[in-house]
Image (cartoon, rainbow, N blue to C red):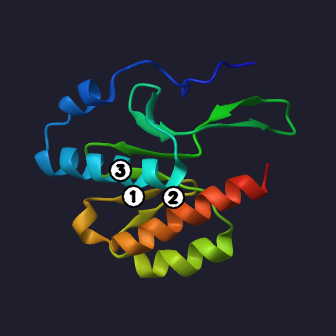
């Protein structure tokens, strides 16, 4: 079975964010860290080479594949932030319409910068994501 690439590492968050060349993206990253640490109660940790995660949970698929993943996470990619949040589809649809400027893929939400979104809506999405993870344990 393939080994997961996205595992918790000991890389320093500040060292990682020091490599982010866009000053707005770097500042927004620290704002996201503050929001996600406050909501989750977990410190920011690096997951793989480019994801900042908070807390963790263990998953196991019917196929037998299993591993650990962060409860909440984001990555300051060059083109946009990738936000990794979980919640039921009804709640996600309800809140995402209020978020602001975003793009969405199956498992993540892409935003260019925090000023493009409503941070109070993001905070609700973070809270719902944590509750969803707790309920699906």
Which one is closest to the eye, mark 2 or mark 1?
A: 1
Circle 1: is it few (<14), some (14-19), or many (20+) Cα within 10 Å?
A: many
Circle 3: is it few (<14), some (14-19), or many (20+) Cα within 10 Å?
A: few
Q: Is residue 87 left or right of residue 48?
A: right
**Quadrant of res 14:** top left
Circle 2: is it few (<14), some (14-19), or many (20+) Cα within 10 Å?
A: few
Q: Front-most of 70 and 66?
A: 70
Which one is closest to the eye, mark 3 or mark 1?
A: 3
- The residue sitting at 57% across, 57% down in the picture is 106
| Mark toward the start of the polypeptide (3 vs 2) | 3
Q: Front-most of 96 and 120?
A: 120
Q: Marks 2/1: CA distance? A: 8 Å
Residue 44 spot, x, y in % from top left: 43, 37
Q: Is residue 96 left or right of residue 89?
A: left
Q: Marks 3/2: CA distance? A: 25 Å
- The residue sitting at 66% across, 61% down in the picture is 131
- The residue sitting at 30% across, 52% down in the picture is 80
Residue 16 spot, x, y in % from top left: 28, 28
Which one is closest to the eye, mark 3 or mark 2?
A: 3
Q: Marks 3/1: CA distance? A: 19 Å
Q: Vertically, is 110 above or below 4?
A: below
Disc 3 is placed on an element classified as helix
Q: Vertically, is 92 above or below 43?
A: below
**Quadrant of res 88:** bottom right
Disc 2 is placed on an element classified as loop
| Residue on which the image places disc 3 | 34
| Residue on which the image places disc 2 | 105
| Residue on which the image places disc 1 | 110
Residue 41 spot, x, y in % from top left: 52, 46
């Amino acid at each position: 079975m393939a080994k997961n690439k996205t595992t918790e590492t000991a890389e320093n968050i500040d060292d990682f964010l020091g490599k982010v060349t866009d000053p707005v993206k770097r500042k927004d990253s620290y704002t996201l860290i503050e929001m996600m640490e406050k909501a989750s109660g977990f410190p920011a940790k690096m997951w793989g080479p480019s994801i900042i995660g908070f807390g963790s949970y263990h998953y196991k698929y019917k196929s037998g594949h299993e591993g650990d993943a962060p409860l909440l996470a984001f990555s300051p990619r060059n083109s946009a932030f990738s936000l990794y949040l979980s919640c039921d589809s009804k709640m996600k649809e309800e809140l995402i319409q209020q978020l602001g400027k975003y793009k969405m893929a199956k498992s993540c939400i892409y935003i260019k910068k925090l000023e493009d979104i409503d941070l109070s809506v993001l905070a609700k999405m973070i809270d719902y994501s944590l509750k969803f993870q707790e309920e699906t344990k």
